[in-house]
Amino acid sequence: MEPTALAQRYAAVKAGIPPGVTLVAVSKTRSVAEIQALYDLGHRAFGENYPQELREKAPQLPGDITWHFIGHLQRSNVKHVVPLAHLIHGVEDQRLLDEVQKRAAALDRTCDVLLQVHIAQEETKHGLSPEELRAAVVTWPWAAWPNVRVRGLMGMATNTDDAARVRAEFEGLKRLFDEVRGGAPFAQDVPPVLSMGMSGDASIAIAAGSTLVRIGTAIFGAR
Ligand SMILES: *Cc1c(COP(=O)(O)O)cnc(C)c1O
């Protein structure tokens, strides 16, 4: 049987990802059937941006999928996301951490999160500035969130054809990661996570030291 277009794209993407780098297949806007088709090819890690979509799709799909919440998370949605998410990528303020703590404690579990850093030259991308992150690491009351496990950082580069700029942004995030990862909030007993790289810039991100890429279009086709 001919491999499907999905199988071909998936194989091509996987071929560019070295061992030790996690591939999260970004399934926002994709149907349950499309996600199931990739699951049937052996893939288990999926990323969703919208709480409502995650809530609708997750119960219809196999229980051994690890769901990554990669979108902008609002406090009102934390209660829906914490029970489903294996890792929440975009945490950027203390009130959100308060809410994740509350919901994780209620479930008697630990919730893994990444702190989002703003590295792009675009106003629309969320996250802490590098200076805010450095300050947060030393001044935020991390002990107040015992059910939150901070695994690392997440960032998005500027959406541009200028590869040198994208490379500089990712390399800057990697340096920041190496600078802060030994500090108070970061779990030391599990491998640290540096989530950077999407369909258009994954190879640059991997060269710069990404440990996790979030790829949608290159696997599923154009949205
Ligand atoms: C949509 C999205 C992706 C995947 O983008 P593609 O260009 O389709 O690979 C990755 N990360 C985040 C945060 C996204 O919102």
Image: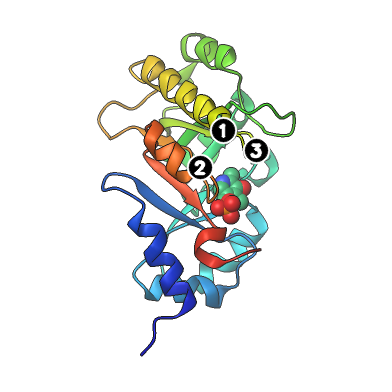
Q: Quadrant of the N terminus?
A: bottom left
Which amino acid type corresponds to the residue marked 3 in the rendered image? Thr
197, 34: nearer the viewer: 197
SS assignment at label 3: loop
**Residue 50, image x, y percentages:** 65, 53
Q: Is residue 28 above or below residue 91?
A: below
> Which residue occupies 66% across, 63% down?
223
SS assignment at label 1: strand
Asked whether residue 104 appears in the rendered view, the answer is yes
> Which residue occupies 54% across, 10% down?
135
What separation in Å lies between label 2 and label 1 (alpha carbons)? Answer: 7 Å
Label 2 vs 3, first from the N-terminus: 2
Q: Is residue 13 above or below residue 134?
A: below
Which amino acid type corresponds to the residue marked 1 in the rendered image? Val
Rate crowding at label 3 as few (under 14), some (14 to 19) or many (20 or more) other CA atoms within 10 Å. Answer: few
Rate crowding at label 1 as few (under 14), some (14 to 19) or many (20 or more) other CA atoms within 10 Å. Answer: many
Rate crowding at label 2 as few (under 14), some (14 to 19) or many (20 or more) other CA atoms within 10 Å. Answer: many
Q: Which residue is mark 3?
A: 160
Asked whether residue 184 appears in the rendered view, the answer is no
Q: Which residue is mark 1?
A: 91
> Is the distance from the Cβ of mark 2 to the nearest ligand 1 atom less than 8 Å?
no
Label 1 vs 3, first from the N-terminus: 1
Q: Residue furthest bottom?
A: 1
Colour logic: rainbow
Q: Which residue is mark 2?
A: 88
82, 117: nearer the viewer: 117
Tell me whether circle 2 and circle 1 mark residues in contact (CB < 8 Å): yes
Residue 73: mark:
none
Q: Residue furthest right?
A: 123
Image quadrant where residue 216 sits: bottom right
SS assignment at label 2: strand
